[in-house]
Amino acid sequence: MSYCCSQWWLLSLAIFLLALTVQANENVVKTAVFLSPKFVLGPGQVEDKIYYNIDFPRGHIAIKEFNGEVVDELGNSVPLHETYLHHWVVQRYNAPKGVKVPEGNGDQELHFSKNFAVRNAGVCQGRVLGQEFGIGSETRKTKVYVPDPYGIEAGNTVEIPNGFEERWMLNIHAIDTRGVVDRLGCTECRCDLYNITRDKSGRPLRPGYTGGLFCCYDQTQCKLQEGFENIKRSLYLRYTVKWVDWEDTIVPVKVYIFDVTDTGTSGCQIEYDVESCGGNDLGNSRCVDTKKSKIVIPGGGEIIYGVAHQHSGGVGSTLYGEDGRVLCSSLPIYGEGQEPGNEAGYIVGMSSCYPQPGTVKVFEKETLILESNYNSTQKHTGVMGLFYILVADSPPKLMPSLKTYVHYQWALILIGVAVAVIVGVGYLRRDQRERGYQSIVMNH
């Protein structure tokens, strides 16, 4: 091998070793795919259970993404026009070590007891909207990745009470609409289609309540077409979690969830009705129902992500600052076909906001304005106007961690060694030439 080729070979080796060193020491994003417990639905039936202690990554981690979809026993994606995913919700909780929490809907008092539920930083103080993650029919096409260097911190033992351990729970609300007489009416939980006059606790519905969560609780039945074959099938929520191991360079974010029904006095109602404008022009501004709410955010910081949650009929939502500045606007993506992720008439995604770091800020105790818009050509029951934001209360750390510093020191050492070898080989070959030695070259 000639001196020139030796130099190139050694230089290539140095670059390769550097790449290996940097790559091996990056905080690699890990991915895991899990299945929820099986649930069985027949045409028109409803699933709405809480599953405790679901599979989830362990350890002190930064969650980068959580998403899910309904699949059948073969792992095939199920279209929304067959099984409508009203919502899924994932929340962490602290459970006494060694104590088994009831499955199904479980012990609600235990669920909401002190030291049990770990709520987000949002402002809804009742028994609702405490989750870190949760959307609905739009789950397949909504970007939910937490950008670097941010992450949702989990598994920090300092924040877990003594004698407890961190676990995760899942609520799935799915409606099977195969063979129903009114698919939209069933997904909007119209009480007449479910023949419901009392809520799941047996209490009479309030006067004027015509549709919503109180009429499509677990195991209720939406009206079917005459003679439709009742074939049940087993389903799962397949959920994907992405995370990295926690490092001191990761900036933790807080999860805030706002609800346009939040009045500040009666709390968050989660759902509301959109009355018909009586018109038939989809582009007519008179047929857009606009609902607004003023919400005081308890903490401040930089918004690094935002997205809204709406139901069919939604035309977009915007979160404003106290001075009227737009913090984030989120618009629905409607499907146009039949395949999963593109179902016509359904919201299959919501646009999300990823502001440049430091460009969009909220201030502690600032009064935000949430606006939710729905097309009101026809009446809609049980719609939602939620808005999720992730807020970092501290800027990214500019100084590299000791671990990163050590990694790059090793990389520099490897380069130094390679360069020394190249110089040494060059010196040796020059010395050989000066002494009259010739290298042996084989000719073919």
Image: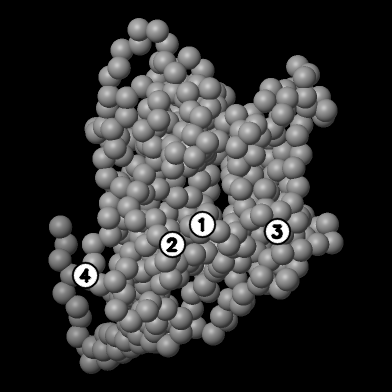
Q: Are marks 2 and 1 in contact (CB under 8 Å)?
A: yes
Mark 2 or mark 3: whose residue is earlier in sequence: 2
- Residue under label 1, please give it: 127
- In this image, 210 relative to 443: left or right? right
Pointer 1 or 3: first along the chain: 1
Q: Earlier in the sequence, mark 4 or mark 2?
A: 4
Q: Which residue is mark 2?
A: 112
For the N terminus, give its image quadrant.
Answer: bottom left
Above or below 202: residue 62: below
Kindly identify the amino acid type of the residue bearing the numbered disc 4.
Answer: Gly
Query: Do the numbered discs 4 and 2 sit on residues whose CB atoms are within 8 Å?
Result: no
**Which residue lies most toward the top here?**
227
Label 1 neighbour load within 10 Å: few <14, some 14-19, many 20+: few
**Does dot 3 land on a helix, a strand or a loop?**
loop
Viewer-side label of 4, 1: 1
Q: Position of residue 82 (x, y in %)?
A: 41, 24
The answer to whether 364 is drawn above or below residue 86 in the figure is below
Say whether disc 2 or disc 1 marks the residue closer to the N-terminus.
2
Quarter assignment of residue 361: bottom right
The residue to which callout 3 is attached is 264
Residue type at mark 3: give it.
Answer: Gly
Question: Mark 4 to mark 1: distance in Å?
Answer: 25 Å
Badge 3 crowding class, 10 Å Cα cut-off, few under 14, some 14 to 19, many 20 or more, is: some
Callout 4 environment at 10 Å: few (<14), some (14 to 19), or many (20+)? few
